[in-house]
Image (cartoon, helix red, strand yellow):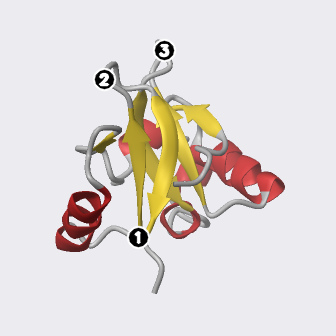
Amino acid sequence: MHAPGPQVDEHMMVDVALSVLIGARVPHLLLQDADGRCTGLVTRDQLAAHRGGSWYTDPTRLRDIPLDRGPFTPSTTVLDDAEAAMRVRTLDVSPVVDEQGYALGVLALTP
């Protein structure tokens, strides 16, 4: 498990989030709601897909784009079970959350 990395509000605009992701030099951002609970994970590829799209003239918020919204990996999950669930859902990364839904870290599959 890795540190959760940058967490941004799900209401952030896609172009701003892409700037944050590039500036932080990370492959993904965790989205959080107004209470700080994890609501999703967005990757550079997902954000880049919107580059040059309608979001430039018609602002799009992160909550409005297709991205992984869970279920996320509970902190009590056995590693083998978490890996199997990620492979079934074809995820390369999955947020690890506590009982209240706050991000503790991120699991990443290695090739």
Q: Is residue 67 left or right of residue 104?
A: left
Q: Amino acid at mark 2?
A: Glu
Q: Nearer the viewer, residue 49 or 83?
A: 83
Q: CA distance from mark 1 to mark 3?
A: 26 Å
For the point 62% across and 64% down, the residue is 27
| Residue linked to disc 2 | 99
Residue at (58, 48) in percent of width and height = 29
Q: Earlier in the sequence, mark 1 or mark 3?
A: 3
SS class, disc 3: loop
Quadrant including the C terminus? bottom left
Compare marks 1 and 2 and give the one earlier in the sequence: 1
Q: Residue furthest right?
A: 23
Check the image and report above or below for 88 versus 21.
below
Ranked by sequence position, the earlier of labels 2 and 3 is: 3
**Residue nearest the observer in this picture, 68 or 48:** 68
Residue 69 drawn at (x, y percent): 30, 44
Please, what is the three-letter code of the amino acid marked with disc 1?
Asp
98 with respect to 86 (left or right): right
- The single residue placed furthest to the top in the displayed view is 35
What residue is disc 3 on?
34
For label 1, the residue is 92
Q: Are marks 2 and 3 in contact (CB under 8 Å)?
A: no
Distance from disc 1 to disc 2, alpha carbons, whole Å, reads 22 Å
Is residue 34 shown left or right of residue 5?
left
- Residue 50, x across and y down, in percent: 52, 62
Say what amino acid the circle numbered 3 marks.
Answer: Ala
